[in-house]
Amino acid sequence: MITDNDELKDFKLRPMKCECNYLNRSDGSAILSQGQTVAVVSVNGPLDIKMQSQSIGKATLEVLFSSKGGKPSIGDRYKEHVIRQTCESAILGCLYPRTGITVTIQELEDYGGFLACCLNACCLALLNAGLAMRHTFAAVSCAIDEQGNIQLDPAPAQLETSRATMTFVFESREKSLVTAFTDGSYSDSAYSEAMERCRSASDLVFQFYKQIVSKYSYVIG
């Protein structure tokens, strides 16, 4: 992971590793690990879909989430909703009217920060699929402990003692907030501080994307 930028030295995330083109039968795919948390994402589309599912002005985006346990829960459906909203804000769907795009997420391991890992894997898989995008997006999670301390990209032990967890998603152009998912109790000032710390730390994720895109777009002349 990139850690040599002096401006980012105070913002540490768990090591990130990614392999694109991980799945053969998809238009784009990525397996991403953030620490021991691992997610696999595949993207298929734009594809022809049934007329009743078509949208005249844009592509129809479907997000499917599969947990490690296999049985969907209310939480899984909410993850789908958050991920779909985030991806819809980034994809230039108007370029693919009357078609469908399917994003499938598979949980492999969850050792904290799983929603952020899923979102970042989705962005890498969309890039790998070559879909036109308004911007890329980066997700960073954090936890607030009983003393009010903010821990970026918390490990399971830190999550167990936290009173609030948050996941923020930022777009690459202006670093504006795209999506926020919070759980627990916190003050307005704690929320603002957590968001700004995650916004700064998102630079690490965007730099990681550049490394991965550079690696997979390299062509021997």
Image: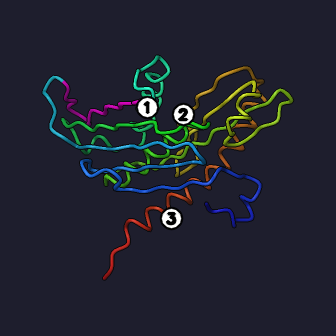
Q: Are marks 1 and 2 in contact (CB under 8 Å)?
A: yes
In the picture, the quarter occupied by the N terminus is bottom right
Which sits in the foreground, 103 or 111? 111
In the picture, the quarter occupied by the C terminus is bottom left
Please say if 171 is above or below 1.
above
Residue 82 falls left or right of residue 13: left
What span is colored magenta in the figure?
53-66
Residue 164 percent coordinates (x, y): 71, 26
- Residue type of the residue flagged with mark 2: Thr
| Residue 23, magenta (yes or no) | no
- Residue type of the residue flagged with mark 3: Gln
- Checking the image for residue 179, the label placed there is 2
Scheme of colours in the image: rainbow
Distance of label 3 from label 1 (alpha carbons): 26 Å
Q: Earlier in the sequence, mark 3 or mark 1?
A: 1
Residue 49 percent coordinates (x, y): 16, 33
Please say if 184 is above or below 194.
above
Q: Residue at x 15, y 38 (%)?
A: 48
Q: Residue at x 42, y 28 (%)?
A: 80
Q: Earlier in the sequence, mark 1 or mark 2?
A: 1
Q: Earlier in the sequence, mark 3 or mark 2?
A: 2
Q: Residues within 10 Å of mark 3 (few under 14, many from 20)?
A: few
Q: Which residue is mark 1?
A: 85
Residue 197 falls left or right of residue 115: right
Q: Dividing the picture into quarters, in which one does residue 69 lie?
A: top left
Q: Are marks 3 and 1 in contact (CB under 8 Å)?
A: no
- Residue type of the residue flagged with mark 1: Gln
Report the mark closest to the observer, 3 or 2.
Answer: 3
| Residue 59, magenta (yes or no) | yes
- Checking the image for residue 211, the label placed there is 3
